[in-house]
């Protein structure tokens, strides 16, 4: 009986698996039929996770840089280097020290990392890598509903009557959630996809609204406007539960009917049908991408408000659902990994919460929010001199030049990666199968993953390593196990109050809030629990990017969808890596998606080299002729970073915007 | 033909366990899922467990297996190649008829063609198979549509049939007969044989009310699949729903696609590597695409088409000496796109009718 149950740790779906672990090698994986979300399925990543877990590219010993080269050291020596490096900067820690945490780390690890940063190193500059989109989602939902997470429950998806997929390539990003949506449709639900690209889920939709790049927001605003004009607003619901409807309704006045189709390229009839369908359905959910880039806050606000006026928040089968691409992105925020947050998504300026936290930690913490690590890396003026990075993905590689100039860099991780070379000191940790730990999936489901294998000889699990660092810094922590860390999390985090390893054991997880009132957790936000829902403030601006004569096409940059392509851990697998890179075999120079008409106009065929020219620069890639993009649109996958990075660097301001940001370009035959 | 008391049946497994690695069905305690895996002791086996989530294929074709170790000595420029063959005696106890049929298909693929697969051959060498007749189907079964069950007719060393208080034990090989004799099993007679037939017939009648998840009238579509006259729109409809997860191949008792990679040895020296063989799938784009070249089966619908050609065409059946699907229903279970073989058969039939 060598198959042992656990959780897939690639994406935020949190599918259950059985891992075949024999003699230190992971020789296979199998899905779990009774798991309420994954129900016996895994995606291409999940089915091959043992390839990652078996990689020889583990960091198996601490390393310290001596004479420009990393050499093996003992933990004691390496921890000493780290502690000294940071102690030297303690006086000015809030300016000089920053911590880049990982959305892959377990809850226990991330919680302790915030404790180290805030109470031992004295800095609030702590950020999750690849975070921006999810933070936007959580801000909107926390302000509107009080729940800083997905308001719906994936278990209810199969019985949901209406699903709106808002620009997420979900069958690629979180395939098993995509599968649940597909099942809902096959059982009779209406599926409306709004996107600028014809994704797989668009093909499986009842109705696909292909909006021009940069205009998706207008479609959601228009749907809201139609509901109001046609008197399809759920007034009963709003009377009881809303705050701010009038203001939102008024702001829609700026959107003129005659502009809607012109700006989005979608017919009014199609938008009207989508809006009416939403109003008529008893239950409805919306899914959008979160993390890496995700949507901008304004678009999320329109989506959320649309669902409020349709009365589709807090009811059975309903949900506003930001979907985390990475396994523990949600858990990272729950643990307070952000410059301005404590665990449970409470502002660090909340004096009562802060004093409970510092009492538990036996040390003061600063109430002044820190700064985001990416911001510090980007700003030439920052005084950053020490950077601690945990298990990073590729997000910070674009700061490579800046990182090289930082005098003290520490890396904590399980797997080797190119980033190690920048480090002054490297500390290995165990992987998730080598200790007990918890992860929180995109629907707030906290799941326990039990130890199944021993770490390479001498390598410490995260909680032990972080405790050892604290101890050497003069703070004695007294956790006896990772379960004890969770006990402390529960003690100081209201949403996790009822969670413990013992309670999670043998279950498929519990969804927070889990507390005295909800001892079994809370599958879904409910109207009963939250009296008022507040409309999100919106910009009222419906500008769309305008192509010009010189640059007639709008270029989309695929980030979230292609995240896995350039991902450091994917590179340690064989089959998923091969699958993510197959397109490169046909288009070895990278590609730009254009329509057949566009190709004809440029005088090129599929596979031919083209220049993609913007006002700021140009890049040479191959044309991929496809029906996935609409007229006047072009698409470049960000994963071919090596090939197009210069071009994107010239347009770096665009990269920072959400998924729906575009660059005007023209396509030229080479 | 022999008899063994129901309460004694695991003694057979115990006996086999003395000389073999023992595999069998059991309920995995934490997930309450039926698995077919190596067990610690005979008593762990639960013959009444439902059809296991994974077929016993992994005992012969593991998900992830080192098959060759090699090292290169830089000084002498010598390459040292050491194939890793696994010929441990293994006993598969309580194999369902569909899964046994699956093993026979694998045998024909790996051992019956021009190229003999050495690694598989060693796995197979000392295998002892104890199958069991299904006296009732499970929800997703449709073995009766493709002659994969509910009773085994060949390929076992011993076959068990639940007759109530006793099991009928049939020997299908000399090895099997020797074990039955050595255990001193009582002889069975024609009456017991008749009772077995009655129970199989009963099982078949139960399909209507119990095996309700899937039906797949495969004979109706085989001609169509072989001639390739299926409308492209049907394949497109099917292909659009494929999530390219590979699961259908992994859980299929007859699927044999594999991938080979060479990896630096874990904790090994600079010039030591392992060659690893892993499960692969025709649904994966990269499986069929050659570097720098043009992929003969680029669009996903063509790859789906390929899978069902493999399962349902006459040409492929010639290799297996039967259809490539044994009717276990697992692909329908695990498919995120809801296009397991039974649904695909339905879509093709629908097209024939229109
Ligand atoms: S959907 Fe996500 S959690 Fe599920 S198997 Fe795939 S990568 Fe793992
Ligand atoms: S094709 Fe599907 S039903 Fe047929 S044997 Fe394979 S897994 Fe079982
Ligand atoms: S199981 Fe379904 S989705 Fe997965 S590869 Fe097979 S047909 Fe495609």
Image (cartoon, coloured by chain):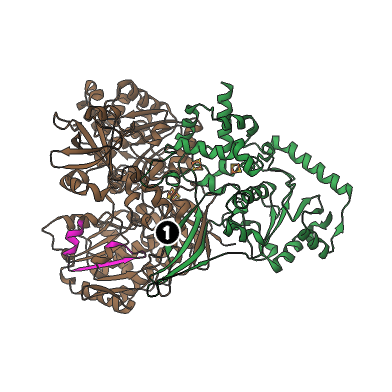
Chain colours: A brown, B green
Residue A165, image x, y percentages: 37, 36
Cβ of disc 1 within 8 Å of ligand 1? no
Front-lying residue, A95 or B211 = B211
Q: Mark 1 points at which residue?
A: A52
Q: Is residue B241 visible?
A: no
Neighbourhood count class around disc 1 (C-alpha, 10 Å): few under 14, some 14–19, many 20 upward: many
Q: Is residue A467 left or right of residue B262?
A: left
Front-lying residue, B233 or B73 = B73
Residue B131, image x, y percentages: 72, 53
As drawn, which residue projects farthest toward the left?
A: A381
Q: Is residue A622 magenta?
A: no
Residue A158, image x, y percentages: 49, 38
Residue A627, image x, y percentages: 34, 31
Q: Using the image, name the chain to which the residue with label 1 belongs.
A: A
Front-lying residue, A615 or A469 = A615
Q: Which quadrant of the structure image shows residue A538? A: top left
Q: Quadrant of the N terminus of chain B?
A: bottom right
Front-lying residue, A158 or B65 = B65
Q: Is residue A88 visible?
A: yes
Residue at image location 35% in from the left, 71% down from the top:
A465
Which stretch is magenta?
A: A399-418
Residue at image location 27% in from the left, 74% down from the top:
A64
Q: Is residue A415 magenta?
A: yes
Q: SS class of the residue under badge 1?
A: helix
Residue at image location 81% in from the left, 50% down from the top:
B164
Q: How many marks?
A: 1
């Amino acid at each position: 009986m060598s198959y042992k149950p656990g959780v897939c740790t690639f994406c935020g779906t949190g599918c259950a698996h059985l891992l075949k672990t024999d003699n230190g090698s992971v020789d296979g994986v199998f899905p779990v039929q009774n798991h309420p979300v994954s129900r016996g399925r895994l995606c291409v990543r999940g089915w091959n996770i043992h390839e990652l877990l078996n990689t020889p590219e583990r960091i198996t010993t601490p390393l310290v840089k001596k004479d420009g080269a990393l050499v093996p050291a003992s933990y004691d020596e390496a921890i000493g280097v780290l502690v000294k490096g940071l102690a030297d900067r303690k006086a000015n820690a809030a300016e000089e020290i920053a911590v880049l945490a990982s959305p892959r780390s377990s809850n226990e690890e991330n919680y302790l990392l915030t404790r180290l940063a805030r109470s031992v190193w004295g800095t609030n500059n702590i950020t999750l890598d690849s975070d921006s989109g999810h933070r936007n989602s959580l801000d909107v939902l926390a302000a509107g509903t009080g729940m800083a997470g997905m308001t719906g429950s994936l278990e209810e998806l199969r019985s949901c009557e209406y699903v709106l997929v808002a620009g997420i390539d979900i069958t690629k990003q979180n395939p098993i959630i995509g599968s649940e949506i597909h099942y809902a449709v096959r059982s009779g639900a209406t599926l409306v996809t709004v996107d600028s690209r014809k994704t797989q889920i668009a093909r499986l939709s009842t109705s696909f609204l292909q909006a021009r790049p940069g205009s998706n927001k207008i479609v959601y605003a228009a749907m809201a406007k139609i509901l109001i004009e046609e008197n399809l607003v759920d007034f009963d619901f709003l009377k009881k539960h809303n705050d701010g409807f009038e203001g939102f309704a008024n702001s829609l006045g700026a959107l003129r009917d005659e502009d809607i189709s012109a700006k989005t390229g979608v017919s009014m009839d199609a938008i009207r049908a989508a809006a009416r369908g939403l109003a008529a359905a008893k239950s409805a959910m919306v899914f959008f991408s979160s993390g890496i880039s995700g949507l901008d806050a304004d678009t999320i606000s329109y989506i959320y408000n649309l669902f409020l006026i349709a009365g589709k928040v807090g009811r059975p089968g309903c949900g506003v659902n930001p979907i985390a691409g990475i396994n523990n992105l949600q858990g990272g925020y729950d643990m307070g990994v952000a410059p301005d947050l404590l665990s449970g998504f409470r502002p660090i300026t909340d004096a009562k919460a802060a004093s409970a936290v510092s009492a538990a930690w036996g040390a003061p913490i600063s109430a002044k929010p820190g700064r985001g690590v990416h911001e510090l890396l980007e700003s030439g003026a920052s005084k950053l001199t020490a950077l601690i990075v945990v298990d990073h993905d590729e997000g910070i590689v674009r700061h490579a030049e800046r990182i090289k100039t930082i005098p003290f860099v520490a890396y904590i991780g399980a797997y080797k990666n190119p980033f190690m070379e920048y480090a002054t000191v490297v500390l290995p940790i165990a992987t998730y199968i080598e200790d007990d730990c918890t992860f929180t999936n995109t629907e707030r489901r906290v799941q326990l993953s039990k130890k199944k294998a021993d770490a390479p000889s001498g390598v410490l699990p995260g909680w032990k390593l972080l405790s050892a660092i604290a101890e050497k810094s003069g703070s004695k922590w007294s956790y006896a196990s990772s379960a004890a860390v969770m006990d402390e999390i529960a003690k100081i985090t209201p949403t996790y109050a009822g969670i413990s390893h013992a309670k999670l054991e043998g279950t498929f997880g519990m969804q927070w809030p889990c507390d005295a009132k909800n001892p079994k957790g809370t599958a879904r936000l409910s109207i009963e629990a939250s009296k008022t829902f507040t409309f999100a403030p919106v910009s009222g601006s419906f500008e769309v990017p305008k192509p010009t004569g010189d640059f007639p096409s709008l270029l989309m940059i695929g980030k979230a969808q292609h995240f896995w392509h350039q991902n450091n851990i994917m590179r340690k697998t064989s089959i998923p890596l091969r699958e993510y890179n197959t397109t490169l075999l046909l288009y070895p120079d990278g590609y730009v998606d254009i329509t057949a008409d566009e190709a004809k106009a440029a005088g090129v065929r599929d596979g031919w080299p083209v220049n993609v020219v913007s006002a700021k620069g140009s890049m040479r890639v191959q044309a991929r002729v496809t029906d996935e993009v609409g007229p006047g649109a072009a698409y470049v996958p960000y994963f071919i970073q090596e090939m197009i990075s210069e071009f994107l660097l010239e347009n770096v301001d665009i990269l920072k915007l959400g998924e729906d940001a575009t660059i005007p370009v023209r396509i030229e035959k080479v | 033909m022999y008899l063994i008391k129901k309460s004694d049946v695991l003694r057979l497994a115990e006996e086999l366990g003395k000389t073999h690695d023992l595999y069998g069905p059991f309920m995995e305690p934490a997930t309450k899922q039926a698995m077919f895996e190596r067990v610690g002791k005979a008593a762990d086996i639960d013959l009444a467990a439902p059809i296991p989530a994974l077929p016993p294929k992994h005992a012969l074709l593991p998900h992830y297996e080192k098959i060759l170790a090699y090292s290169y000595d830089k000084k002498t420029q010598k390459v040292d190649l050491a194939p890793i063959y696994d010929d441990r005696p293994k006993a598969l106890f309580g194999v369902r008829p569909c899964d046994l049929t699956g093993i026979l298909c694998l045998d024909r693929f790996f051992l019956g063609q021009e190229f003999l697969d050495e690694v598989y051959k060693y796995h197979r060498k000392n295998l002892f198979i104890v199958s069991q007749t299904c006296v009732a189907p499970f929800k997703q079964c449709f073995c009766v549509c493709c002659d994969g069950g509910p009773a085994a007719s060949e390929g076992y060393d011993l076959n068990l049939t639940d007759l109530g208080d006793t099991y009928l034990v049939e020997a299908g090989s000399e090895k099997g007969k020797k074990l039955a004799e050595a255990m001193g099993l009582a002889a069975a007679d024609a009456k017991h044989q008749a009772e077995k037939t009655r129970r199989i017939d009963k099982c078949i009648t139960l399909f209507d009310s119990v095996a309700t998840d899937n039906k797949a009238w495969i004979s109706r579509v085989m001609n169509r699949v072989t001639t390739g006259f299926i409308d492209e729109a049907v394949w497109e409809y099917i292909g659009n729903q494929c999530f390219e997860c590979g699961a259908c191949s992994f859980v299929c008792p007859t699927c044999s696609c594999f991938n080979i990679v060479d990896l630096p040895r874990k904790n090994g020296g600079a010039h030591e590597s392992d060659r690893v063989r892993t499960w692969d799938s025709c649904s994966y784009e990269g499986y069929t695409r050659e570097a720098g070249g043009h992929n003969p089966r680029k669009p996903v619908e063509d790859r789906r088409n390929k899978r069902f050609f493999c399962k349902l065409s006459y040409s492929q059946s010639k290799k297996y000496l039967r259809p490539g699907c044994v009717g276990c229903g697992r692909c329908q279970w695990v498919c995120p796109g809801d296009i397991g073989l039974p649904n695909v058969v339905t879509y093709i039939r629908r097209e024939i009718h229109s």
